[in-house]
Image (cartoon, grey):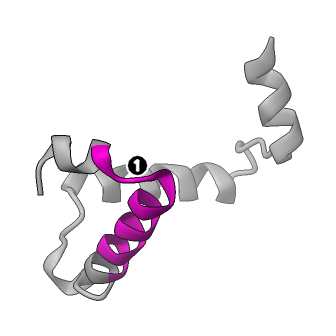
């Protein structure tokens, strides 16, 4: 399927196509490997949480932050 063909589709058709692709990809998780840097970032964040150095905010606070 080409980009031109996707552009001809309605928004609903594109969303449905995206959902089909997502379902297919998520069922093939064992074939998708996370990059090494992802594991390092997760360990770093877990360490910050364990040390009480991680700050959590609500979704509304995050949205407000980016509205400014």
Question: Is 51 or 3 nearer to us in this picture?
Answer: 3
Question: In the figure, residue 28 lies in which quadrant?
Answer: bottom left
Which residue lies under the disc numbered 1? Answer: 41
**Which residue: 54% across, 51% down?**
45
Question: In the figure, residue 18 lies in which quadrant?
Answer: bottom left
Task: Residue 35: give x, y in percent of width and height.
Answer: 20, 56
Q: Badge 1 local density, few (<14 within 10 Å), some, or many (20+)?
A: few
Q: Is residue 6 left or right of residue 48?
A: left
Q: Is residue 53 left or right of residue 42?
A: right
**Which residue: 88% across, 40% down?**
60
Name above or below for residue 61 compared with residue 28. Answer: above
**Which residue: 36% across, 72% down?**
22
Task: Residue 39: give x, y in percent of width and height.
Answer: 33, 59
Question: Is 19 or 61 nearer to us in this picture?
Answer: 19
**Which residue: 85% across, 26% down?**
64
Q: Residue furthest top?
A: 68
Question: Is 7 or 24 nearer to us in this picture?
Answer: 7
Q: Is residue 4 magenta?
A: no
Name above or below for residue 36 compared with residue 55. Answer: below
Name above or below for residue 48 compared with residue 21. Answer: above
Q: Is residue 23 left or right of residue 51?
A: left
Task: Residue 30: give x, y in percent of width and height.
Answer: 20, 85
Question: Is 1 or 59 nearer to us in this picture?
Answer: 1
Bounds of the magenta span? Answer: 8-23
Q: Quadrant of the N terminus?
A: bottom left
Secondary structure, mark 1, is: helix
Task: Residue 34: give x, y in percent of width and height.
Answer: 24, 64
Q: Is residue 10 magenta?
A: yes
């Amino acid at each position: 399927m080409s980009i031109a063909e996707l552009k001809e589709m309605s928004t609903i058709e594109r969303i449905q196509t995206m959902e089909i692709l997502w379902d297919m990809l998520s069922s093939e998780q064992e074939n998708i490997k996370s990059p090494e840097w992802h594991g390092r970032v997760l360990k770093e964040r877990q360490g910050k949480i364990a040390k009480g150095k991680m700050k959590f905010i609500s979704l509304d606070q995050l949205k407000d932050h980016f509205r400014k």
